[in-house]
Image (spheres, rainbow, N blue to C red):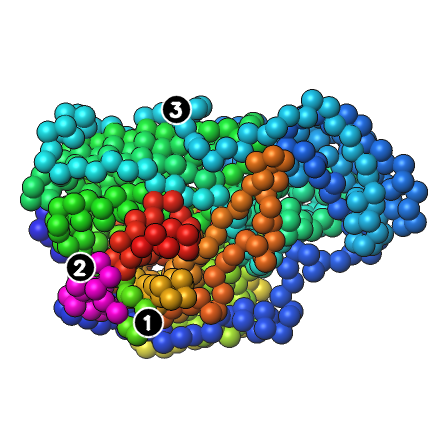
Amino acid sequence: MAEQQDQKDQPIKINQWAQVTEGTENGIKVLTGKPIARIDAPLKVTGRAKYTSDMHFEGLVHAVPVQATIANGRLKKLDTSAAEKMKGVVGIFHRGNIGPLYRVAPGEGMASKVDETRPPFEDDIIRYYGQFIAVAVAETFEIAQAAAAAVKATYDDVKTPNVSLDLKQEDLKKTESHRGDTKAAFDKAPVKIDHTYVTPMEVHNTMELHSTVALWDGDKLTMFETTQAAVTHQNIIAQMMGVPKENVRVISKFLGSGFGGKLWCWNHSPMAAALSRQLKRPVKIVVTRQMEFTNVGHRPRTQQTIRMSADAKGHLQSLEHEYATQASILDDYKENCGEVSGSLYNVAAVNVTSGVARRHQGTPTSMRGPGAVPGLFALESAMDEMALALKMDPVEFRILNDSQVDLSSGAAYSSRHLVECLQLGAKKFGWSKRDPKIGSMKDGDEILGWGVAACTWQARRLDANVTVEFHLDGRVKIASATHDIGTGMYTVMAELMREETGLPFDRIEVELGDTSLPPGPLAGGSMATGSMVPATVQAAHEAIQRLKKAATSFHSSPLHGEKPDDIEFAAGLLKSKKTRKSIAFEKLMKENNMGIVSGYGSSKGNFGPAEKGKPATKSFGCHFIEIGWNPLLARVRVRRVVTVIDGGRIINYQQAKNQIEGAVVMGIGMGLFEEAVYDARFGDPVNKNFADYVVPVHADMPSIDVTFLDYPDKAVNEYGARGVGEIGLAGVAPAITAAVYHATGVRVREIPVKIEDLLKS
Ligand code: MOS
């Protein structure tokens, strides 16, 4: 055990990595680094990176969907006559004339996941405001837009929609996690809390709108799609079109962010494919900013009750987490808020139950850190309230209840360093200077509030396949149908190849985002990097092994007759360990008339709970946040964030840091600004634009200080890289509301924090 422990916490030597260096801060192992540019940066800053909606083809037509203007009822009649008469209109399509659009068979897990399972126009029932009821196709976007607006719809059975904000467990009720007797423990515990926390409906609002360009060539379909999951999309579109998977090619080279909103297929995409098939012309659909609020998923509102108890010394005794999340009328998406409740802390009695409340609203979907992010708002808010009830410091309270075992499964963590995160974060933030008295800390007109929260996210892997090719011109190329969704995967892959081959970046080529490449993992769940490592290492080894074989078997090679195992490969050079003779791989290939030397890597995923006998693999971290409350201006702002993340080995320091910083910004949005607000009469989201749906902007930015601990997690992959992204958002909102309480004495349990809440202080 001791030996195992040593091994798992051994920092692997990473000094050869140009941009990452190991070090210590306050005796805790941390990583530092210097920024390196993304290899795709020149393409992006010069506008040469083509995004889906940039694609244009000869004869392309534009399609604009027509949306329902009721949220609950039935489509009676569509009058398309005026629209059809408009010059440049190709046609108005709907249930009656678009042709077959099939449902996707469930049962392949993520490989066939669709959150809105009903294909477009399947029936005439309207279940949410903005539902697509027809689509106008025209020679230009402007004409299509005008034609869509000229389509007149009438409705039957129009009823007031149910968009009620009060969520109860009405359907899909389930016990998520259970151990011990929570009721008995709660009843006899000396210190307890019982509160309900609410998180809002949030919209991903990626800068790049969802879009599709579809073109058929005979019975073969090519689709340019805004997707985080080309391989999944291929499978889904093939089923919706009723054609073999091999007939569909999905391409997505660059993405203007996804945040989970582009993981699964949405209705505009099969619509474009069906139109293109029928019209025999390329078809482009770009979803509007307004449609982004209703037709392509959102994070559902959640309502979560936490009952928690502790003994007088602060040891947790029981945790009940009872939650409901908004769902659409037809679909079964449930926000998995209880995911971490059974595992984050050392508590013997746990009961987590869930359910959904169906509303006349669009289908929710995964949004950055689905489940854990809203779940941790409730859990970490409760932890703060419990610390207060115990008159304990919230950092000490969390450290006291740390657990090195995932008690929900009984599996020990492969590498859990939440305590070090909290200790280092406290040190860097200056937590010891905190006066716990409410409103006691000031800076000029601002009253300061200091809050803290922990965060965690799963570290699992998906299936991955990779090819590595050495080319005659001295380049090495790596390819896989995974994605760079803005996260830096192109650079991460180049970094892995630099590590495996010793070649500089300008001799490494990375190709991603095309189903004609070996099937790669979807870019979601912060899993892509971790998933790609084993297959990449394997493919590189295989290709290098073939080069060694060629070098020792071809007669003209200076290494002829030696054993492949005696050859090393460094910086593109094949070199004998015995004779010190060497040859560059491209020279070997040229002299022996080889065009390409390739290797294939394939690795199985392990998504889901830890397998029996295997450790639990998760990332951990914490945020320390300072807010300023100015009662004269009635203004609250985040002034300072210190974040510490235990995310295993970091492959690319700069981009990992960017991921966490971006996630913290999103957390500020969640805590202070973001909420899709529905009109209860019509079921229409009234703030479906960037003017009224408030997201953080530069003026809202605090200083953000991100530190990574340096504990490679070899249980995840060879490099110990867990992958980061979503974890940076988890825990931000509860740290903000804890800080707001510290400044004002107002406990906000329903986010975003509103000025009206604070005027009570
Ligand atoms: Mo993330 S919600 O898995 O893109």
Instruction: Tell me the distance, in whole angstroms, between the alpha carbons under discs 2 and 1.
Output: 19 Å
Residue named by callout 2: 436
Q: Residue at x 32, y 26 (%)?
A: 175
x and y percentages locating residue 318 in the rendered image: 18, 34
Q: Secondary structure at mark 1?
A: loop
Q: Of 374 and 618, which appears nearest the observer?
A: 374
Asked whether mark 1 lies closer than 8 Å to ligand 1, one says: no
x and y percentages locating residue 491 in the rendered image: 47, 66
Q: Earlier in the sequence, mark 2 or mark 1?
A: 2
Residue named by callout 3: 173
**Displayed quadrant of residue 386:** top left
Q: Is residue 472 above or below residue 142?
A: below
Q: Secondary structure at mark 3?
A: strand
Whether the residues at callouts 2 and 1 have beta carbons within 8 Å, the answer is: no
Q: Residue at x 55, y 48 (%)?
A: 262
Q: Secondary structure at mark 2?
A: loop
Residue range (magenta): 422-442
Q: Earlier in the sequence, mark 3 or mark 1?
A: 3
Q: Is residue 81 visible?
A: yes
Q: Earlier in the sequence, mark 2 or mark 3?
A: 3
- Name the mark nearer the viewer: 3 or 1: 1
* Residue type, mark 3 in image: Lys
Q: Is residue 365 left or right of residue 527?
A: right
Instruction: Tell me the distance, in whole angstroms, between the alpha carbons under discs 2 and 3.
Output: 40 Å
Residue named by callout 1: 445
Q: Is residue 611 left or right of residue 78?
A: left
Whether the residues at callouts 3 and 1 have beta carbons within 8 Å, the answer is: no
x and y percentages locating residue 463 in the rendered image: 43, 44
